[in-house]
């Protein structure tokens, strides 16, 4: 089994099987790039496995997948939608998008469960070592403490500010111990 990789890591893949063969106790299928899962023909599954397509072999199903934010089985069309969506996301933001979906606090496109990329881009606030670090940078970027005299700034409780700010955000763990921050609009 060959694993395809992208610049950001392993590519999304789907193991597509002939459903009639599977229901008969035969594992007939192969791994495909998830983005092309809906282009796979039933005959290709049988050619790849060395079996002959039967008249009852009409339906295919994704029995396993890698690097897709799905649980369990799915249709080839669903795997392809997710694969193409992940291909459309900047490589450096794919893990963040998947974290946003895992959070359950993502905005889905009107026609299904796929996340809305424009909403993701609007809500994604970056990867941070801690939420307090994000709050500090936000306070600095917005000039929140600009008019506060230098001698009074140490009295501002950044931890309390971050605590209250967190109610308007969603966070998810990031690889390496940090966290992804998403604005809840």
Image (cartoon, grey):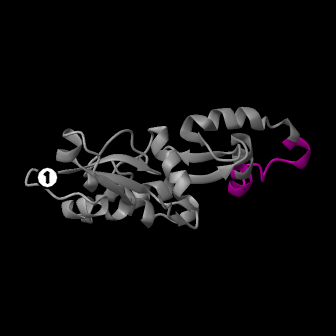
Residue 133 spot, x, y in % from top left: 74, 46
Q: Quadrant for residue 151, please give it.
A: top right
At 81% from the left and 47% from the top, the residue drawn is 148
Q: Is residue 74 above or below residue 157?
A: below
Is 114 or 109 nearer to us in this picture? 114
The magenta segment is: 138-153
Residue 90 to residue 18: above or below? below
Please indicate whether residue 152 sits to the left or right of residue 70 in the image: right
Residue 185 visible, this angle: no
Residue at image location 86% in from the left, 48% down from the top: 149
Whether residue 52 is visible:
yes
Neighbour tally class for label 1: few under 14, some 14-19, many 20 plus, Cα within 10 Å: some
Dot 1: element: loop
Magenta span includes 144: yes
Q: Where is residue 3 drawn, in percent x and y? A: 50, 60
Mark 1 = which residue? 57
- Residue depicted at 87% across the width and 40% down the height: 154
Toward the viewer: 81 or 13?
Answer: 13
Indicate the position of residue 98 as horizontal and vertical percent values: 49, 49
Question: Percent position (x, y) of residue 10?
Answer: 53, 59
Q: Is residue 59 placed above or below 45 in the rendered structure? A: above
Relative to 149, 87 lies left or right: left
In screen coordinates, is 140 left or right of 92? right
Picture quadrant of residue 87: bottom left
């Amino acid at each position: 089994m060959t694993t395809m990789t992208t610049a950001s890591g392993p590519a999304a893949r789907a193991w597509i099987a002939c459903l009639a063969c599977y229901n008969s106790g035969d594992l007939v299928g192969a791994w495909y790039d998830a983005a092309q899962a809906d282009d796979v023909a039933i005959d290709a599954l049988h050619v790849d496995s060395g079996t002959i397509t039967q008249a009852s072999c009409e339906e295919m199903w994704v029995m396993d997948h890698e690097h897709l934010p799905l649980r369990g089985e799915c249709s080839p069309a669903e795997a392809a939608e997710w694969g193409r969506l992940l291909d459309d996301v900047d490589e450096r933001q794919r893990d963040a998008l998947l974290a946003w979906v895992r959070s359950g606090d993502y905005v889905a496109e009107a026609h299904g469960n796929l996340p809305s990329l424009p909403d993701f881009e609007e809500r994604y606030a970056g990867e941070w070592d801690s939420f307090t670090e994000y709050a500090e940078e936000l306070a600095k970027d917005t000039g929140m403490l600009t008019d506060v005299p230098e001698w009074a700034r140490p009295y501002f409780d950044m931890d309390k500010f971050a605590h209250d700010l967190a109610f308007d955000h969603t966070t998810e763990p990031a690889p390496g111990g940090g966290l992804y921050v998403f604005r809840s609009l």
